[in-house]
Amino acid sequence: MAASTHTVTNQVPPLVGYDVFATDRALTEAVGRHIAPEILPEAQRELGELGLSAGSVQAQLWGAQANENPPGLHTHDRYGHRVDEVEFHPAWHRLLGHAVSAGLTDAWGRPAGHVRRAAGFLVWTQAEAGHGCPLSMTHAAVPALRTDPALAAEWEPLLTSHVYEEGLRPPSQKAGVLFGMGMTEKQGGTDVRSNTTRAEPLAGDGEYLLTGHKWFCSAPMSDGFLVLAQAPGGLSCFLVPRVLPDGARNTFAIQRLKDKLGNRSNASAEVEFDGTWARRVGEEGRGVRTIIEMVAATRLDCVVGSAALMRQAVAQAIHHTAYRSAFGGLLIEKPLMRNVLADLALESEAATTLALRLAATYDADTDAERAFLRIAVPTAKYWVTKRCSAVVGEALECLGGNGYVEESGMPRLLREAPLNSIWEGSGNVQALDVLRALQREPQALNAFLLEVGKARGADHRLDAAIKDLLTELADLDAVEARARRLVERMALVLQGSLLLRWAPPEVADAFCASRLGRDWGSAFGTLPHSLDLASIVERARAQDR
């Protein structure tokens, strides 16, 4: 065969060896906006180091290896003893180790900790998203444990440690631990109040034995789990360690691992408890209230994780079109492709800006900000996670057939995209949670309206959208059937307000024209042609300039 037939032309170099943080203008600007000047240089240095690692050949290889070699379950050893261990590829441990050492489980006790962690989570999970699950649950377990000062004193230093140690050993023998959680059961799913797992009290204060099952238990090799079970006083929250203080294995029978659409590197298990020792967290009968702060924190991570997937997909699409030629020129210079890319970039920037604003709310920790979080987190979780699959799918199409091939990395992003919309409550659950806040917590709505009102007068399309929203909010009769429509409008108004305050004029103008002014079609690439689309695309390009 003639060598000339193997000449490679018009193929795109891989997007590798770049700083994932520094080349993301929306993210770097958000970090600069929300972190105090005296802390900012240190945070930028940390995030820059993480960004270079995330964009490296090594991290991309780890991500591919962890997904190509999914975890395997070993229920018994060679002699027939139950061991219930899940074996991960070494790449999984390297990804986790790098993440923990970068502080991605440490937000609650350091200045601007939530913004720094959210930005790092957004950067690092672009290398591989599956290992974000134990990172998220470990981070989110802290506020739940703080309802019991003794438990918090024992576990929080290990949860927020910057040291990752794999393997099952007593926590006292480890420099850092990871946590998971188990709430859903076969019969209930999101309806956790229908849980059937029983908790029988022992003589020791706060000690129980659990009997029952969990239908989804992610990262089963974690050191501890927060679970819900029915105690004599009602549904309660419990801490289940994998290894007991004396070194014995707690009863934690892993029945099987889920064969999932995406998130392949992460193990999700069905687990049986049979006389499993546990410590109660919080009061009996107050399990949902105890664990709700953990749920809220993981919901925010769903927003951040979706923003990360969108950012990586858009970065890959723009990179590809900047090098690929067709019909006499680079794809990125073609007006229709530029419209598609700009539209995708708008969605990505709006998601990033909102995610970091919510993280900053945690750092502020005032009554007003907590009220804002109550309604803004489920609103953002509903909308941003739903936009993720659409963005990733369109970005994949920008690469054409090359994007449909596993080597491009785009199929892995697409398989991962729906997860955050399902995890921690699907779309209907989030919409109904917003309705509960509207009906029961007027301070939450007031905080939301004060936030969006900060941009009133800046754009007539936002002003009109706020007016329409207030009309909808004034009539909550039969609201459940239109809850999704209402929450979507709330999310778009909030994103538009934030972009008008903080994004470049061309970005805010395009967002308001399309998402609020409704000069937009039903698919990406239908922005008004009169907008400054070239500047929007250039701003989103992931390369050093």
Image (tube, helix red, strand yellow):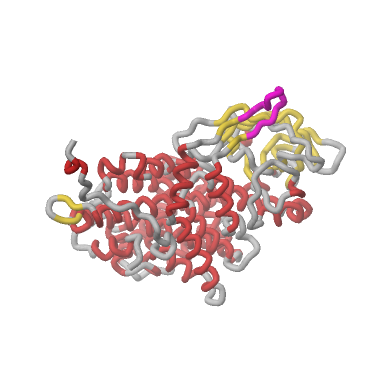
**Residue 183 can be seen in this image:** yes
Residue at 65%, 55% (x, y): give it. 163
Q: Is residue 350 left or right of residue 71?
A: left
Furthest residue in direction left, as rendered: 328
Position of residue 334 measured from the top left corner of the image (x, y, whole percent)? 18, 55
Furthest residue in direction bottom, as rendered: 38
Residue 78 on the magenta segment: yes
Position of residue 67 measured from the top left corner of the image (x, y, whole percent)? 47, 40
Q: Is residue 499 left or right of residue 256?
A: left
Quadrant of the rendered image containing residue 84: top right
**Residue 426 can be seen in this image:** no
Furthest residue in direction right, as rendered: 203
Furthest residue in direction front, as rendered: 2
Quadrant of the snapshot with the N terminus? top left
Position of residue 97 measured from the top left corner of the image (x, y, whole percent)? 58, 51
Please report the bounds of the magenta region as a residue range: 74-85
Q: Say above or below: 394 vs 81.
A: below
Residue 451 on the magenta segment: no
Residue at 23%, 65% (x, y): give it. 532
Q: Of residues 83 and 423, which is closer to you in this image?
A: 83
Position of residue 127 measured from the top left corner of the image (x, y, whole percent)? 45, 51
Q: Say above or below: 273 vs 124.
A: above
Q: Of residues 409 and 268, which is closer to you in this image?
A: 409
Q: Of residues 486 and 388, which is closer to you in this image?
A: 388
Quadrant of the snapshot with the C terminus? bottom left
